[in-house]
Amino acid sequence: MRRIAQSVWIVVLAIPAVYAQLRFPCSQLVTERLDPLVTPGEVSPHLHQIVGGNAFNITMDPENDLPGLSTCTTCRFVEDKSNYWTAVMYFKHPNGSFIRVPQMANHNTGPGIQDGGMTVYYFQPRAPTSNLNIVAFRKGFRMRVGNPMRRRNDIDPSSTEATATSFRCFVGSDPGVGLPGSGPADSFEFPSVPCSGGIRSNIYFPQCWNGVDLDSPDHESHVAHPIGALFGTDCPSTHPVRLPLLFMEIVWDTRPFNDPALWPQDGTQPFVFSMGDPTGYGQHADYVFGWEGDSLQRAMEVCFGGEGIATNCPVLTVQDTDSMNNCKQGAKVPEVTEGQYLEKLPGCNPLQGGPEPATSIPNCNAPSTTTAAPVPTGPSVVVIPPWTVCNPGTVHQVGVPFCDSIPPKTGTAGPLQTSPPAIVTPF
Ligand SMILES: *[C@@H]1O[C@H](CO)[C@@H](O)[C@H](O)[C@H]1NC(C)=O
Ligand SMILES: *[C@@H]1O[C@H](CO)[C@@H](O)[C@H](O)[C@H]1NC(C)=O
């Protein structure tokens, strides 16, 4: 426990010139083949896992009032009705079938254990010479990072973009060391060996904005990474407005698939992303801003030095983990995507291993319309991670929330880490 606390703090200290951070869990909202940013109004080519407000939809007009349209959010802060989504990881069995890899709670994201989803960070990076003020995203703002068609390490290693998406191979309960993307256990492709504590995706969004456009045709060119490094560097003159640095971590529970007999005999690894990517280089994420009013701006101005503990930001309102986990949407695309072995990945996604960029495969008879009666995807099963998510004691540990810091709304449900919905230990 002490070791984990220290490691988390080492990560924070290892980031030079950063004011502070909001760090909070968001549970799964829905898993479905929609992407209102890249393919609005259509069924998306590949499967996504989505968190945030329940106004997520097949089309999300920038004029939509997400805080007004949402009746709940899967995120810790009730003000955050944004949506965040990424591709989904599958395990490829030696017999050729695929099964979705479950997701689990990250270190120190409690109290309570979230149902899948991700950990979201809003860092307040401190620039050396300019763009000292952090300007929160505006209503209608959206962006994407990463390229689902990418299949090799083709980005100039000296560019900031080169470290935007990566993986960490967890050993047991240890969170590892180093800035995510630069640590000794980190890689840009899927880890090549079994990871006994699961695999974490690390995804940094661009933090510099052109100050004008809420979006751009490629959903990327209105924003940029800073020059030279992710922290403590200036924005390019083309994108002079400093945004909060949005960063997300997704913990994939690969523990049930670590048996060497289940791994390919040719020395490759067995995990793939939902767009038919067996390399991991196609890792990508999308963001649609939806915080209530000026709540994010206020948090950026006031919440410094909070150790990434949600209750340390007094201008925002936290909700308990049961409330996060109970905010759910039905899947609007009528297809089975998880909970059982599938003969192929949802959509038209044969594995494309590169090194050439992947191409889109048309006309494979996958469902292309949504259903009028959305259905819940899979059983609501909360995985217990191999590490603690909160501090059950009374002595403060840096970066670790106390287990009694956010009482469950249901009151007498018993120990926080075993309260409903049904929690099962993995496989
Ligand atoms: C999604 O959009 C449809 C119209 O396209 C609308 O009828 C429905 O209410 C929306 N759902 C949510 C959750 O906003
Ligand atoms: C592959 O193995 C899994 C696990 O035993 C099984 O559920 C699935 O049906 C098998 N697929 C094929 C094509 O045999």
Image (tube, rainbow, N blue to C red):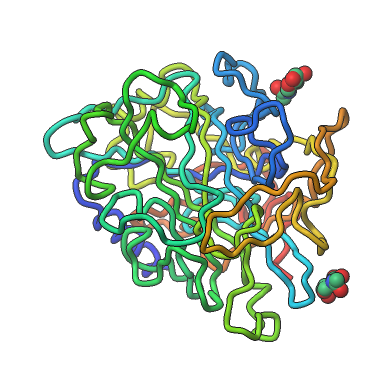
Image quadrant where residue 358 sits: bottom right
* Residue 146, above or below 272: above
* Residue 370, above or below 414: above
- The x and y percentages for residue 63 are 56, 13
- The x and y percentages for residue 239 are 28, 29
- The x and y percentages for residue 214 are 44, 21
Give whichever of 354, 21 is nearer the camera: 354
Q: Residue at x 55, y 18 (%)?
A: 62
Image quadrant where residue 349 sits: bottom right
Q: Residue at x 64, y 35 (%)?
A: 35
Ligand 2 sits in quadrant: bottom right
Q: Quadrant of the N terminus?
A: bottom left
Give whichever of 340, 34 is nearer the camera: 34
Q: Residue at x 56, y 68 (%)?
A: 198
- The x and y percentages for residue 14 are 25, 58
Position of 353 with respect to 122 (left or right) is right
Image quadrant where residue 410 sits: top right
Q: Quadrant of the C terminus?
A: bottom right
Q: Residue at x 85, y 41 (%)?
A: 334
Give whichever of 98, 83 is nearer the camera: 98
